[in-house]
Amino acid sequence: MKRTSISVRIWFILGLFSLGLLINSYLETTNTRNAVQSCYEDNVQHIVDAAKGIIQHYHSRYLAGELTEEEAKRLALEAISAISYDNGNYIFMGDNEGISISNGMKELVGTNILGMQDPTGLPLVRNLYEVAVSGGGFVDYQWPDTENKSELLPKTSYADYFEPWQWTIGSGLNIESLRQDLHVIQEASWINLVLVMLSVGLLVLFFIRRVNFQVKSVVETIRKLAGGQGDLRERLPISGGAEISDVATSYNLLVAKLENMAEQVHREGDRFLTAMQRMQPQSDITLMEKPEQLTLDHLQSMISQICNQAEALEHAHENLKEMAEQDPATGLLSQQAFNLRTAERIAALDPNTPNTLVILAFDQEALTHQTLTERVSMAAGVLRHGLPDHVLACHVAGKGFVYWCSYTDASEGMRLAMSLQQQMSLGVDGEREQTVSVGMSAVLGGGKSYELMFSEAERALIRAQKEGGNRVYEY
């Protein structure tokens, strides 16, 4: 049901409404049938009461001596036999022995009808006599249809009793007239039902078509926007129902913000790319053109272009940073970069990680400038090839070389320092050519600051130099 469209839901509601109308019409028709039948029964009772009144009139004249009893009975029978109503309906009467004394079916007059039964075997005449004697009432029975004798129809007759002459007076409902009236009522009810359903259906159809048009317009616009093709400058009309207007208003606010964002990205992107052009005049950077339609695809393209240029700028920055941190004479880190990186790594060390700071120095007093330059270059080459990649190293003018390294084993620091000292002291022919002294400061984790470790390594170096050089001392 959650995925069902609005039109289907509305038609479903209309279907429920129509079903309710059908049930209501059926109940109303049933109630109307009962009410009409009740009216017919009241009319029959009134007719019988009127006939009884006629008999009472003639009986009163007999009691007054105006008529003999036989004349009174004859005149009463003549008057009642002449009564006809509802297109042939009549009043029947019988005496206390069950002899028919007045009947619309003349062939039954003078015959004993007390044993007459309906097609189902119900003794309807006896039942009529019994209810008449008990004060009057209705008897229900079955009677063949006048047009189709094989079809039985429910029928009701009313009977009353005139005690002075022991006559039973009765009359039945006119079933044909009742059926015609009920047919007219039912036909009018169904016609009204159809007219109501058609009217409501047409109104619902008009409403659904209007709502669907508005909803599809909004959905199509949002689908274009989501697909990156919708123009951020276009706005939805604020029309239709309250809900559709709210959706359109919210959409317009959204695209207005997206448009402002796209315009800002375009402006800032142009500023950024212009700055990039000034920084890199030889590059093929082109400024972004403002399109006729400002779409999300164009916004994404602008952001992608800016990101690509920012990435290129980041690479250039890294290259410049690397060039700025490198000493061009030795290929090692500059002293400033070495100090900064070493301090950062010491601060981030695990407390149980061994690490050492080492200073390597050779005698420089008797060397010419050219020879000193060659020795520095050679020593730098030894460090570049002899130190692991993660080791930080630099050249300190007038002092020597400094490197810092962390290990998994504390003894590794001493072994590496002694190996480098031996390599740096050898000449081209493999013989000892210069005096190289080494001072070390070792510690577990970041227990010592970089400045303290450098100071300790300097003191260890001075001690090694004072004792003749070519020594590796740890503070």
Image (spheres, rainbow, N blue to C red):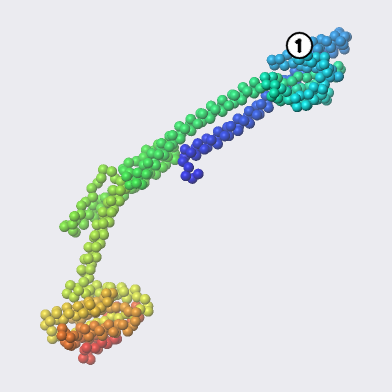
Residue 108 vs residue 246: left or right?
Answer: right
**Viewer-proximal residue among 138 and 127:** 127
Task: Look at 76% across and 16% down and name the residue there.
Answer: 91
Point out residue 171 in the picture as x, y percentages from the top left corner: 76, 19
Point out residue 131 in the picture as x, y percentages from the top left corner: 81, 25
Using the image, determine if residue 295 lies above or below residue 433: above
Disc 1: which residue: 82
**Viewer-proximal residue among 73 and 66:** 73
**Viewer-proximal residue among 67 and 179:** 179
Classify residue 245 by image quadrant. Answer: top left
Q: Please, which residue is most extreme toward the top here?
A: 66
Classify residue 278 by image quadrant. Answer: bottom left
**Viewer-proximal residue among 340 and 331:** 331
Residue 422 vs residue 29: left or right?
Answer: left
Residue 53 in sight here: no
Amino acid bearing label 1: Ala
Point out residue 425 in the picture as x, y percentages from the top left corner: 19, 85
Point out residue 32 in the picture as x, y percentages from the top left corner: 65, 26
Using the image, determine if residue 310 lies above or below residue 24: below
Using the image, determine if residue 253 lies above or below residue 415: above
Task: Look at 20% across and 81% down and name the residue there.
Answer: 400
**Which quadrant is home to the C terminus?**
bottom left
Local packing at callout 1 (Cα closer than 10 Å; few below 14, some 14-19, many 20+) is few
Secondary structure at numbered mark 1: loop
Classify residue 196 by image quadrant. Answer: top right
Using the image, determine if residue 46 lies above or below residue 388: above
